[in-house]
């Protein structure tokens, strides 16, 4: 089953070690690569007093469900202090959140508030767009399919005018 989850729906999910049926932490934040359109890892809060960040790479996650993240064992948790690649992932700065979406013709489409992820593959399949608090309350936020033809800028994403609109 293909489940589409918003980034904020993944954050705070418990992470379950299926080998012992025990919760080993919860998702603190997500790490993704906007250009690859892919979730890369989940940063976890383990409830302990460990210094630094711990994460689980996407390929080590068995499943991301609506109510929990399932992993095979505690061994998949990686400390960023022990893994240069993990540390690089955490500091990559690939955030789309807060960027404007502007069309090729110069129309401001709104601000990216969240990403939509396909849980099985980790692919980013959509972007949730806000047109301001009042418009969000009256009309709801808009979700667009993740554009294929996109230009990544420092302050904005430039997309074709023909983006597909999906209302909630």
Image: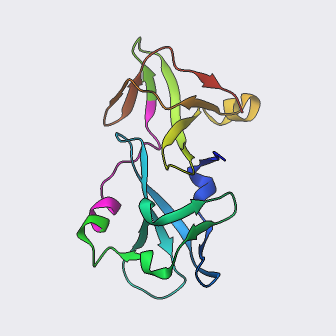
Q: Which residue is more in the foreground, 13 or 142?
A: 13
Q: Within the magenta stretch, is there residue 97? A: yes
Looking at the image, can residue 45 be seen? yes
Question: Relative to 154, is 29 on the left or the right?
Answer: right
Percent x, y for residue 102? 44, 23
Question: Relative to 144, is 67 on the left or the right?
Answer: right
Percent x, y for residue 34? 38, 42
The image shows a total of numbered marks equal to: 0
Q: Quadrant of residue 67?
A: bottom right
Looking at the image, can residue 131 be seen? no
Q: Which residues are magenta?
A: 87-100
Q: Which residue is more in the foreground, 78 or 71?
A: 71
Q: Within the magenta stretch, is there residue 13? A: no
Q: Main secondary structure of the magenta part?
A: loop
Q: Which residue is more in the foreground, 101 or 79?
A: 79
At 54% from the left and 30% from the top, the residue drawn is 145
């Amino acid at each position: 089953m293909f489940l589409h989850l918003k980034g904020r729906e993944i954050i705070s999910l418990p992470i379950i070690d299926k080998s012992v049926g025990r919760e080993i932490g919860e998702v603190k934040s997500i790490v993704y690569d906007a250009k690859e359109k892919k979730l890369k890892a989940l940063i976890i809060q383990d409830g302990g007093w460990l210094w630094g960040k711990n994460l689980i790479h996407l390929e080590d996650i068995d499943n991301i469900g609506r109510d929990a993240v399932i992993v095979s064992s505690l061994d998949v948790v990686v400390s960023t202090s022990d893994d240069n690649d993990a540390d690089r992932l955490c500091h990559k700065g690939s955030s789309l959140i807060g960027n404007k979406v502007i069309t090729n013709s110069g129309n401001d489409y709104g601000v990216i508030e969240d990403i939509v992820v396909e849980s099985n593959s980790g692919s980013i399949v959509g972007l949730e767009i806000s047109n301001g608090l009042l418009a969000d309350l009256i009309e709801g936020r808009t979700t667009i399919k993740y554009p294929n033809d996109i230009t990544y800028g420092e302050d904005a994403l430039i997309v074709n005018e023909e983006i597909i609109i999906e209302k909630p």
